[in-house]
Image: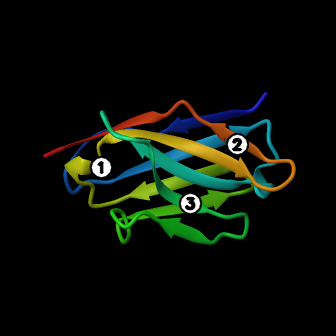
Amino acid sequence: QVQLVESGGGLVQAGGSLRLSCAASGIMFGIYAMGWYRQAPGKQRELVAGITTGGSTNYADSVKGRFTISRDNAKNTVYLQMNSLKPEDTAVYYCNANLAGAGRRNYWGRGTQVTVSS
């Protein structure tokens, strides 16, 4: 059974920091590209940051320079370090695991709420 379990969300003041974690089980973590997405009320889910199996990263323009995605394959965990948080970062943050190619697979966590107060 595949599980992606997010943690680390919460309430923080603008300018503060949070570190999200996503622990994966039931998959060969090292062969999956991992990503963090977010969905604010009334908005579509959007990609925040992604990291490939080789460690290459990409970010939404809105978070570049503030957020950092990383992965620890030994711990089957992906992280999202969020600094200089803004009220517009308020959303439910979801972890995603994606395996491209012929045997494609895609999995989602249940999400963790991040609320940034002004």
Q: Position of residue 89 (x, y in %)?
A: 30, 49
Q: Secondary structure at mark 3?
A: strand
Residue with the most extreme right position: 102
Type of amino acid under label 1? Asp
Quarter placement of the N terminus? top right
Left/right placement of residue 1 relative to residue 115 reads right
Q: Is residue 84 left or right of residue 73?
A: left
Q: Say whether marks 3 and 1 touch (CB < 8 Å).
A: no
Seen in the picture, residue 113 relative to 71 is either above or below; the reply is above
Q: Quadrant of residue 48?
A: bottom left
Q: Residue 106: which numbered mark, if any? A: 2
Q: Residue 83's spot in the image, x, y percent?
A: 33, 60
Q: Residue furthest left?
A: 118
User: Mark 1 sits on what residue?
Assistant: 89
**Number of the label disc, if any, that sits on residue 50:** 3
Determine if residue 8 is in view. Answer: no
Q: Give the residue drawn at x 62%, y 72%.
A: 56
How far apart marks 2 and 3 lie (CA) works out to 14 Å
